[in-house]
Image: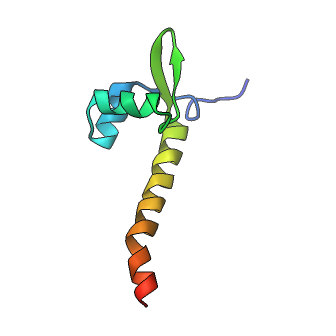
Amino acid sequence: MKDYDGDLRLLTLSEAAAILQVSRRTILRMVHQMEVPAFKVGGQWRLRESQFRQWLEEKEGQAKRSYLEPYRLAG
């Protein structure tokens, strides 16, 4: 049997909110608006840590690109 430990680590909404430094209510809104990849387990929302980290890296990349865009146009 394969060891899926790292890939299957699940975050609660509170853990994800702490990582983003937002409230639990904010992360729940983001989940409902499908901004963050999440799914329900036994009626409670969970986020796969590997997908959450990938989503976060993509968001960081988008933020950097949008921040640098005016400088690219001016140059």
Q: Quadrant of residue 14?
A: top left
Q: Position of residue 66 (x, y in %)?
A: 42, 67
- Up the image or down, 40 lies above or below 11; here it is above
Foreground residue among 27 and 9: 27
Foreground residue among 27 and 29: 29
Left-right relation of 52 to 67: right
Q: Position of residue 50 (x, y in %)?
A: 54, 39
Query: Looking at the image, which residue is at 51% across and 29% down?
Result: 38
Q: Quadrant of the N terminus?
A: top right
Foreground residue among 15 and 4: 15
Foreground residue among 60 and 34: 34
Query: Looking at the image, which residue is at 47% across and 23% down?
Result: 46
Q: Quadrant of residue 31?
A: top left
Q: Position of residue 37 (x, y in %)?
A: 52, 34
Left-right relation of 9 to 63: right
Query: Looking at the image, which residue is at 45% across and 84% down?
Result: 73
